[in-house]
Amino acid sequence: MGIPASTPPTEHVVREYEHAVVYGDFDSEQVLHEGGLRVLANGWVELGTGRLISPDAVHHVDPQPEELE
């Protein structure tokens, strides 16, 4: 049995971060978002504004990036 299609994706949160950086490339040069977010069970990344980033666009998420000096 799966998740009903009528269920909003935000009800199936896998991870929630107060501060994280979402990268679109392996080298961590293409920053897609920095700040609070949720990684949903279906792979989508939900931003604090409610906008979604497709799993196809995300290479990786760093939950607590090191501070730049």
Image (cartoon, rainbow, N blue to C red):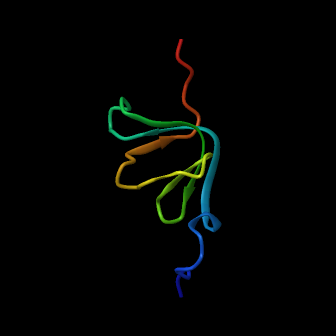
Place of residue 17 in the rendered image (x, y in percent of width and height, measured from the top left):
63, 45
Q: Residue at 55% of width from left, 60% of height from top? A: 40
Residue 49 image offset from top left, x and y in percent:
61, 46
Q: Is residue 6 above or below residue 48?
A: below
> For residue 23, which quarter of the picture?
top left
Position of residue 46 relative to residue 9, above or below, is above
Left or right for 61, reference 26: right
Q: Is residue 14 above or below residue 59?
A: below
Residue at the (37%, 45%) spot, across then down: 59
- What residue is shown at x 42% (from left), y 44% (from top)? 60
| Residue 24 located left or right of residue 1 | left
Could you say where residue 55 lies in the image, as x and y percent from the top left?
A: 40, 55
Residue 66 rendering spot, x and y as whole percentages: 55, 25
Q: Nearer the viewer, residue 47 or 1?
A: 47
* x 57%, y 21%: residue: 67
Total label count? 0
Q: Residue furthest bottom?
A: 1
Q: Is residue 27 above or below residue 41?
A: above
